[in-house]
Image: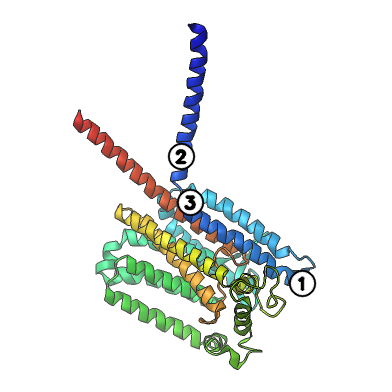
Amino acid sequence: MSVISLPTRRINSSTSNRFSAKHNVTPLIESIDLPLLLSALVLLGLGLVMVASSSISIAERQLSEPLYYFWHQLSYSIIGLIAAFIIFKIPLDFLQKTGPVLIVISLVLLSMVLIPGIGREVNGSTRWLNLGIISLQVSEFVKLATVIYLAGYLVRHNEEVRTNLSGFLRPLGLIFIISTLLILEPDFGAVAVIAMTAMGMLWLGGASFFQFILLMLTMGAALTLAAVSSPYRMERLTTFLNPWADPFDSGFQLTQALIAFGRGEWFGVGLGSSVQKLFYLPEAHTDFVFAVLAEELGLFSVMLVIALFCFIVIRALMIGRRAEKRERPFTAFLAYGLGIWLGLQAFINVGVNMGVLPTKGLTLPLMSYGGSSLIIMCVVIAMLLRADFETRQFDRNSQGKRKKSTVGAAW
């Protein structure tokens, strides 16, 4: 009997270990929003391909290294994924507490950029801090810090925002200071994104219709004043209405982007076969990578990219709504804010590439070349995944408590 029972115990132990391992892995998989994660990874991978394709000619001419921008973008992607993994492990309660600190850091960094010798100028704009290995585009960090701070503010002062004008106006004063510093760089595109994201978050936070209209009028007046006060901004605003009026000067970028869309037709001219990226389309691997994608891969790929961005934004809003129903306000406002920001920036970049919006100098999230933008966007996706993860954990804990109370009541 002992000879027979020994292998029986081993078989049972092995089966139990396998079951335990499967049981441990399954909740982890179920706790991650895989469709959201996969959508972001598809955009990231497609972005790497398009950066390589769109930059190969300019990298060969300027640096004698065809894949220079691709290797840098790949490095940024790896750093971004590592940063995303770290952020995913951080509880959102900690982020809520750090919101005011992040805003103070943002104001300090924005001020440092404007100091001669510290800020780095590129194409007439001083938006970068030289950190040695990499250059930090401060506006990308500021966008993230603003969303985190506003989410925390709406939790702390939600009743004031709903009922009191002062509670509504206080965050606007902060947005005004941030916008002023950004305009001095100048970075008008970042001002537009931050202002509209703040408007969306305050609206979802319960601001009254009158307050919202007041905010829209104030923001509209400020943005209009900023536009008309600078000749180059005014030129950008008017050129997109008819870029063909001056196709070799002020309308050059938009006309070349439109030509790229026209050449792409349904299925594109083939990966790597773009003509517009051959020194016709300025900033082909940064602001106008979407136009190169349209030329090389066609309308179907354009529709796929737009669909993926729409899916991510809708998913973010769904995460926020689910958290709001579970009375987790910071998680809800954070998800709303991140979704609005990502959607706005993607919408503006696509609109600029298609000639329906004036050029803003905004990157396409997860796809355009640029270390700061790519790393921050990876962090944004990680925060959305964390928000979804914590909401699911809250549901599991609530179900566990209900089961225990039901069993206790039955006994």
Please provide percent x and percent y for residue 342.
Answer: 48, 66
**Quick one: 26 or 69, which is closer to the camera?**
26
Residue to which mark 3 is pinned: 34
For the question of whether residue 258 can be seen, the reply is: yes
Secondary structure of the residue carrying numbered label 3: helix
Residue 135 visible in this rendered orientation of the protein: no
Q: Residue 352's image quarter? A: bottom right
Image side of residue 30 versus residue 124, left or right: left
Instruction: Kindly indicate the quadrant of the structure image that contains residue 201.
Output: bottom left
Q: Position of residue 318 (x, y in %)?
A: 38, 59
Amino acid, disc 1: Gln
What kind of element bears circle 2? helix
Q: Residue furthest front?
A: 266
Look at label 2 and name its amino acid: Thr
Determine whether 292 is above or below 47 in the image.
below
Residue type (three-letter) at the residue carrying disc 3: Leu
Colour setup of the view: rainbow
- Relative to 198, residue 90 above or below: above
Label 2, label 1: how many angstroms apart (C-alpha)? 50 Å
Give the spatial CA distance, label 3 vs label 1. Answer: 40 Å
Q: CA distance from mark 2 to mark 3?
A: 13 Å
Q: Which of the 4 image quarters holds residue 245?
A: bottom right
Q: Given contact means CB atoms under 8 Å apart, are the residues at marks 3 and 1 in contact?
A: no
Q: Which residue is mark 2?
A: 26
- Residue visible at 33% across and 41% down? 397
Residue pushed farthest right? Answer: 64
The residue singled out by tag 1 in the image is: 62
